[in-house]
Image (spheres, coloured by chain):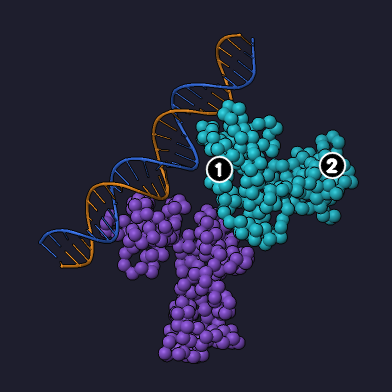
Chain colours: A purple, B cyan, C blue, D orange
Amino acid sequence: MELTTAEENYLKAIYHLSEEGKKSVSTNDIAAAIQTKPASVSDMLRKLGEKEVIQYRKYYGLQITELGKRLALQTIRKHRLWEVFLVDKLHFAWDEVHEVAEQLEHIQSPLLIERLDAYLNYPKFDPHGDPIPDEYGDVRSRPRIALNEMNIDQGGQIVAVKDSSAAFLRYLDKVGAYIGARIKVLDKVEFDGSVEILVDQKKTLFMSKDVASNILVLQS
Amino acid sequence: MELTTAEENYLKAIYHLSEEGKKSVSTNDIAAAIQTKPASVSDMLRKLGEKEVIQYRKYYGLQITELGKRLALQTIRKHRLWEVFLVDKLHFAWDEVHEVAEQLEHIQSPLLIERLDAYLNYPKFDPHGDPIPDEYGDVRSRPRIALNEMNIDQGGQIVAVKDSSAAFLRYLDKVGAYIGARIKVLDKVEFDGSVEILVDQKKTLFMSKDVASNILVLQS
DNA sequence: ATTAAAAACTAGGCTAAACTAAATAATGGT
DNA sequence: ACCATTATTTAGTTTAGCCTAGTTTTTAAT
């Protein structure tokens, strides 16, 4: 099964929307996600239906198939591996990688991805903390909790952010709350939901509820 | 000036043909080089002419412009840097890199290429020994000589191969005559043109004229 | 239950890049 | 210098992916 670049992008968007969005994925949602017009989406849905990566009945919505899920996860795997490469090896900043990875993810070469994975030492998470599917599409997603929902004295490791805007990522970098940092909740202010945490057993940090709710932690 | 992937491929082919082929580049040559039909080439030549990367008068032939040369060299630069990456970092064999590099060369991101270049330590030659243009398109091509044309006792460094077929590259790898190897001519057999060389000051190697004439050496 | 608004789809058109078939220009051999 | 061969270009289609405009279906409000 061969997908074009455009088809891969649609399928990836559909997969992401299916994951988060509760019910079915709408044509308008997809159009918004990939910056295109609903009419173009309708067209593409028909084609993706024919290729059996989604199950599609017009006006009734769609459902991604197992095949579709597998292909989408392959693209996501490639995207995230390239992000790791760009950040770890080429020293890109968190907020500079997305566009480039968006192009690199469409390179077709199973060998390349296999070698890249090995070269990067089989990373399990990308620089934003999102899990990297294995070559069969399996995602080992550990239970994560928003930092503001943790209890006092609980510890863990920062593994992801919800808001990955450039501004937010820069802020985190600056205060030292990077992905992978080991943290412990020292105090919580009931009044406004802000928290005080200990980072890497040396630095204490205050953050508002707004910030803390955007940081995902793997509890330990 | 923005070129599509197809335009980049045409321009690259035209550049290569202009370099080697003495006189003007023919429509048929281009068609053969990029595996397409002459009619498609005519079409594209008109477009490339409009974009002023070539000077084109139908039936009269074409000439690549300075602008075209610069753009072609940028693509070639990217291609060769990726080849270095694939061989040096991902341990691809010489004969496995071309297809993948052919895809990677079209990724658009000046920053990516800048960082990749630095990461690879500003290589001057690709794994086949071809020079890598700098970001302004300058090629530092040192004078090279075919191994069979060197004199006895002359030394040098293997910098390129003329025949880069998989079979030949594998053969060279096997006998240890890699790109970069320092060699010295120990003996030449007048009768059949075969040569005996010393590789890296330890290993002696016999090779036929056929083989030696396909190896380019930078004399020292 | 009706109907206005929103969502989704179809039709028709555009561009890039390819193709085949047909037309035209250049070339070479006598 | 002629004419047959070869090279090249034009014309007309095709496919993918997008668009706008217009139509149909669903939905939600009264």
Choose between A191 and B15: the one closer to the eye.
A191
- Could you tell me residue A35's position as x and y percent? 42, 57
The quarter of the displayed image where residue B61 is located: top right
- Could you tell me residue A112's position as x and y percent? 57, 57
Image height of B68 relative to A133, above or below: above
Image height of A132 relative to B178, above or below: below
Q: Is residue A120 visible?
A: no
User: SS of the residue at dot 1?
Assistant: helix
Q: Would residue B91 appear left or right of A32 to someone viewing this image? A: right
Tell me the number on the disc at residue A61: none
The quarter of the displayed image where residue B20 is located: top right
Q: Would residue A44 appear left or right of A141 to someone viewing this image? A: left
Give the letter of the chain under mark 1: B
Judge if badges 1 and 2 mark residues of a common chain: yes
Tell me the number on the disc at residue B7: 1
Mark 2, Cα crowd under 10 Å, few <14 / some 14-19 / many 20+, is some
User: SS of the residue at dot 2?
Assistant: loop
Q: Looking at numbered disc 2 in the image, what kind of residue is underneath it?
A: Met
- The residue at the far right in this view is B153
Q: Looking at numbered disc 1 in the image, what kind of residue is underneath it?
A: Glu
Q: In this figure, which residue is indicated by the disc labeled 2?
A: B150
User: Which residue occupies 63% across, 52% down?
Assistant: B78
User: Which residue occupies 42% across, 90% down?
Assistant: A190
User: In the rendered structure, which disc, 1 or 2, sits on the residue that comes first in sequence?
Assistant: 1
Pair 1/2: label in front:
1
